[in-house]
Amino acid sequence: MKDELIERIVENVLQGRRNKEDEGIEEDYAGEPGVAELVQEALDSGIDTNTILLKGLSAGMEQVGQKYETGEYFIPDMLTAAEAVEAGMKVMEPHLAGEGASEGKGKVIMATVEKDLHDIGKNLVSIMLKGAGFNVVDLGIDVPAARIVEAAEEEKADLVGLSALLNTTMVNMEDVIKELENKGLRDKIKVIIGGAPTSDDFADEIGADAYGKDAFAAIRAAEQLLSGGKK
Amino acid sequence: MSQRGVIVGKPYERLSREQVEIINRTSLDLLENPGILCYHEESVTMLEKAGAKVKATREGEHDAWWVSIPEKVVRQALDTAPSKVTLGARNPENKVVMDAEESRVHFGSGSETNYWLEIEPETFSSKKDGREQVFPVMKKSRGNLSFLSRSAHLANNLENLDFFIRNVNVQDEDITTDNKDVNVFFASLNNITKPVVGGIADFNQLEQVVGMAEIIAGGRDELVNNPVTSFITSVIKSPLQVVAETAEKLIAIARMGLPVVISTSPQGGSTAPIDELGMVAQVNAEALTGIVINQLANPGAPVIYGAVPVRARMDDLHDMYGVPEFCHYNMACAQMARYYKVPCYSTAGVGDAKVPGVQAAVEKMFTYTAVPFAAPDLVHYAFGLLDKTQTFSPEQAVLDNHQIGMVKFLHRESGVTTEAADKTRKVVEEVMNSPYRMYARYARKMLRKGGIFEGFPFEGEADDQDQTLLKLHERFKQLEEEKPQHLPEDVCKSIFEKTPGLLPRLNPYAN
């Protein structure tokens, strides 16, 4: 029963089903419980959060990652699976708080920098980070440097992820790093940048810790920078 | 019903109805005056009996006849010519079913190139800094049976290739006029389960080739029902001349009840007028002439209107394929064939370029995107042809397969229905009320059903080099590893017993 429930969680992560309303990739999932309902059922039946997290949600996400690597899955599958994991995490949140694991792999502030309204890449990274077990606070688009740093301080963030799509706005990323330095937070908070006009060179130039050429590179960089989880 | 090819929902009509009728009228007038110059006596006899006016003449060393074909003879032939013709295949699922009143486009190969051009990757080091890099080096070889067999095997594995016309001319030492046809047809049929279409070089081998096809199909009636091989006859020498030996083949094939393409290939600027009206009126008259002879020989025989109009280069009068006039000619011909309700054999995708690369890609993509909009039933020359049909490149054929996949995708139905609109409203509402307002989730079903095109699969990793050709070479080598689908052993045995001239080295079961 316990193993079967966990397997169904994995299966529904692969299908990207947040809840019973969602369609799967394949047919015949209409009305069947999704990840949220299954996680609730698992909790109700006494399965511990660690097992649900590791053997259910994370294991599912791991399989999705492997399928992506082999070309069987694509970005929409990864995103949808990450959303399903997030739905499961929401159900688990009240239980995790008591166990001191609510921060997951670390807390990340995500934002598209000031004067830039583009958010596909930033959203992608946010969803994937959540699916990978990070606690993400997404500030949205066109966010001034001061607000990003303020949120990072308030939320006791480990990492700030900055996105820009325009040559004219990417320069605002440097303002965020300077503001972190001014506030004396730079040593505690890592910075990852991404977006079409940015590069490794640009990251070095402005003093960022890493550049993510795509969402997966960003997740890998976040995991490396915060390896060991929440300190 | 054919599962191959792609339906073009609304064929592009370059010509108005009035313009189609002007071309039809002009072609019919040309067939009456000056008429055709025919070198084949039996054709002349049939035409005269049907009502044509005939006047004997001499052309050099040959007897010839001026034949004035009246409209009623053409009309009668068009009345008996079927609008539905099937190209059979060893695997019946690969049959190409043409219906001139439908608009399903199929893509195929051709023609018999003298050269096989293959990529051989080679590592070079920079004179400047010694850095090593792999580049595609081209190796050009004269065509032979081995290359023909390999190209048929490749064609079998290119999912967007719907019919096979041999694309390599064989120049082996043990191949002569007396054994060429049986060997090239066997090399083709033994390596592909899709329709094989080809010309006969030597009339005397027609019966043997048909005999071979009968063994494969299981008998004469079975062959007529599933013509695993069909024929092409270039019965016309432009302008407006009927060639004796080819006419003989055309008549014999018609009497066997096997499908035949009337292929006429005038060159605008040398053997036909270069302007669209002039070219199309002439090539149309030539195709109609072939159809008339075919139908007089056997009314109701399966026949395909084959027009291969090309334009001359103005600097050397060679053929030129990658130009807008080529598309104009071919699109107009497709419209004429549809007007007559006869299946149409057309052309697109030849590179004037000598090697695969930017020029070839531009020329090919231009014509095999444009011409199919007019919805001819068959588009030949579409795979691997370069240097104005002189060279076949397998790597280019792999690229063409991908590009033709794009063209087929282009003609997919839009999916706009009332039910789909209801779903769209629901999805937009859901997304607008979700945190990230992204539609990625909803792309998955289409992705799984093949509803989203794969993109360009031959993209390289280098920042400073176009690696497409190297990737194509890798893919070609992978496809070459695919298991051959040879004829069954008993069928091969029977063919080798009954077909004189077949080279034992082609038998896959010989030790």
Image (cartoon, rainbow, N blue to C red):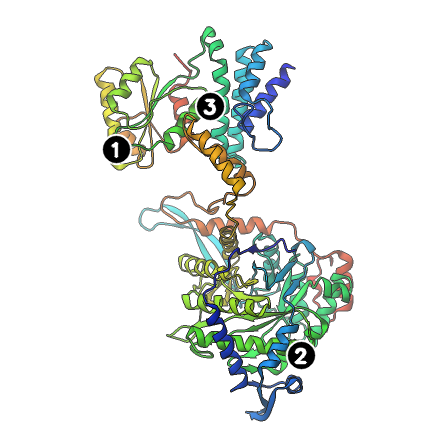
Camera-side mark, 1 or 2: 2
Which residue lies under the disc numbered 1?
A169
Could you tell me if residue B112 is visible in this image? no
Residue in view at x 52 percent, y 74 percent: B265
Q: In the picture provided, is B143 more to the left or to the right than B128?
A: right
Q: In the picture provided, is B179 more to the left or to the right than B449?
A: right
* Residue projecting furthest to the left: A182
Image x and y of residue B200, in percent: 64, 73
Q: Is residue B62 above or below residue B305?
A: below
Residue in view at x 43 percent, y 61 percent: B363
Which residue lies under the disc numbered 2?
B296
User: Which of the 4 quarters of the picture holds residue B377?
Assistant: bottom right
Q: 10 Å neighbourhood of mark 1: few (<14), some, or many (≥20)?
A: some
Q: Which mark is residue A131?
A: 3
Q: What amino acid type is highlighted by mark number 1?
A: Thr
Chain letter belonging to callout 3: A
* Residue nearest the viewer, comparing B293 with B425: B425
Q: Could you tell me which quadrant the C terminus of chain B lies in?
A: bottom right
Q: Could you tell me which quadrant the N terminus of chain B lies in?
A: bottom right
Q: What amino acid type is highlighted by mark number 2?
A: Leu
* Residue nearest the viewer, comparing A178 with B149: A178
Image x and y of residue A192, in percent: 33, 26
